Amino acid sequence: MAAMKVVRNLDLERYMGRWYEIACFPSRFQPKDGANTRATYTLDPDGAVKVLNETWTGGRRGHIEGTAFRADDAGDEAKLKVRFYVPPFLPVFPVTGDYWVLHVDDAYQYALVGQPSRNYLWILCRQPRMDEGVYNELVERAKEEGYDVSKLRRTPHPEPTPESQDAPKDGGLWWIKSLFGK
């Protein structure tokens, strides 16, 4: 299979902020019935990126915090590594994964993110809703990169979008449930 085309010279400062998950490949690390899933990225002075992933299940907020960093400091490709400590309620074990930005538009409003095994894929947007034409373009781009796009699952974003500080926390239950495929 051909090598994936990865964004070159990603402007990390412009990439920071909140991104809403529009669609993804289902993962055992996320609840199957998660809604309003989003990621917030904050750039540290040392160049590392603080990562906050959030999702809501049954009105409760599940979240995990991690750190992202360039896989190759000398490279110009948007190949990052993301490290989380699990379980989130008792962070003990480091889990590191690839986070490759395959496409970002010129205005940094939507992105396609994957990784080399093609087992994970995310379509992200700065808003909880994405234009259907843009969505279809990103799906086509993923297909061109060798992804089985039939596995994509749309992420629901019911109104109103919740705020983190207002939501009751689930205490990490989503993570335990995910181990059992719930």
Image (spheres, grey):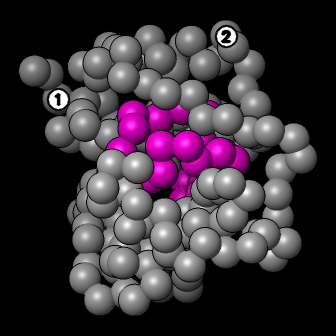
Q: Is residue 176 left or right of residue 15?
A: left
| Residue 161: percent from left, percent from top | 83, 50
Q: Is residue 79 left or right of residue 163?
A: left
The furthest residue to the right: 160
Q: CA distance from mark 2 to mark 1?
A: 26 Å
- Location of residue 135 with respect to 88 vertically, above or below: above
In the rendered structure, are the residues bearing label 2 and label 1 in contact, judged by CB atoms less than 8 Å apart? no
- Location of residue 34 with respect to 68 vertically, above or below: above
| Residue 98: percent from left, percent from top | 28, 54
Q: Would residue 56 be visible to someone looking at this image?
A: yes
Q: Is residue 20 left or right of residue 98?
A: right
| Residue 26: percent from left, percent from top | 39, 38
Q: Amino acid at mark 2?
A: Gly
Specify whether residue 34 is painted magenta. yes
- Location of residue 134 with respect to 3 vertically, above or below: above
The furthest residue to the left: 1
Q: Would residue 110 be visible to someone looking at this image?
A: no
Residue to which mark 2 is pinned: 133
Magenta segment? 11-40
Of mark 2 and mark 1, the one earlier in the sequence is 1
Counting other residues with Cα less than 10 Å from the Cα at mark 2, is it few (<14), some (14-19), or many (20 or more)?
Answer: few
At 51% from the left and 20% from the top, the residue drawn is: 138
The secondary structure type at the circle numbered 2 is: helix
Counting other residues with Cα less than 10 Å from the Cα at mark 1, is it few (<14), some (14-19), or many (20 or more)?
Answer: few
At 58% from the left and 66% from the top, the residue drawn is: 62
* Labelled disc at residue 3: 1
The secondary structure type at the circle numbered 1 is: loop
Q: Quadrant of residue 141?
A: top left
Specify whether residue 39 is painted magenta. yes
At 60% from the left and 19% from the top, the residue drawn is: 135
